[in-house]
Image (cartoon, rainbow, N blue to C red):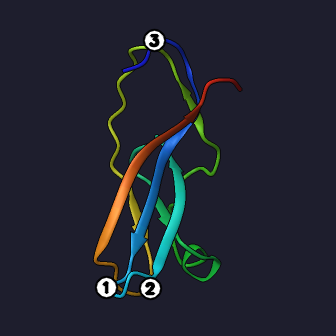
Amino acid sequence: MGNSTAYNAGLKVEAYSGSGVLEINMTVPFVSGYNFGTDSSITSKLSQLGPAQLGNLTSGQAVMIDSDIYHEGVVTNWTVTPAWTNSP
């Protein structure tokens, strides 16, 4: 919860293989019901792609998110961190 607008808001997703190799490093917007691919070959196969543009959240605004990230391979460890800027 913030006191002012969060610009360019999204979720930064970093996922690693069992050997510690970074497999996914992307920021997805705060939108629900969309799919995101980790590279162009996966993205071309998805029928419902999420918007690429990050949005803005106003102070106190709540957001429900239900999105899928598709990747060819296995990840065993990941972090998801809110990301934003303080100005547009």
Q: Secondary structure at mark 3?
A: loop
The picture places residue 12, in percent across and down from the top left corner, at: 48, 52
* Residue 11 percent across, percent down from the top left: 46, 47
Q: Is residue 58 above or below residue 66?
A: above
Label 2 – label 3 distance at C-alpha: 39 Å
Left or right relative to 9: residue 32: left
Q: Nearer the viewer, mark 1 or mark 2?
A: 1
Q: Which type of secondary structure does the marked residue at label 2 adopt?
A: loop
Quote the CA–CA distance across marks 3 and 1. 39 Å
Among the two numbered marks 3 and 1 on one chain, the one whose residue lies closer to the N terminus: 3
Q: Alpha carbon of mark 1 to alpha carbon of mark 2: how far? A: 14 Å
Which part of the image, by quadrant, shows the C terminus? top right
Task: Give the structural element (helix, strand or loop) at label 1.
Answer: loop
Q: Are marks 2 and 3 in contact (CB under 8 Å)?
A: no
Residue 24: image location, x then y, percent: 48, 71
Which residue is more in the foreground, 35 or 80?
A: 80
Q: Earlier in the sequence, mark 2 or mark 3?
A: 3
Q: Which mark is residue 72?
A: 2
Q: Quadrant of residue 82?
A: top left
Find the residue positioned furthest to the left: 76
Mark 1: amino acid = Gly
Using a 10 Å C-alpha cutoff, classify the residue at mark 3 as few (fewer than 14 neighbours), some (14 to 19) or many (20 or more). Answer: few
Residue at image location 60% in from the left, 41% down from the top? 54
Amino acid type at mark 2: Glu
State the mark number for residue 3: 3
Compared to residue 83, the image places residue 14 above or below, namely: below
Please give the residue where the numbered disc 1 appears in the rendered image. Answer: 18
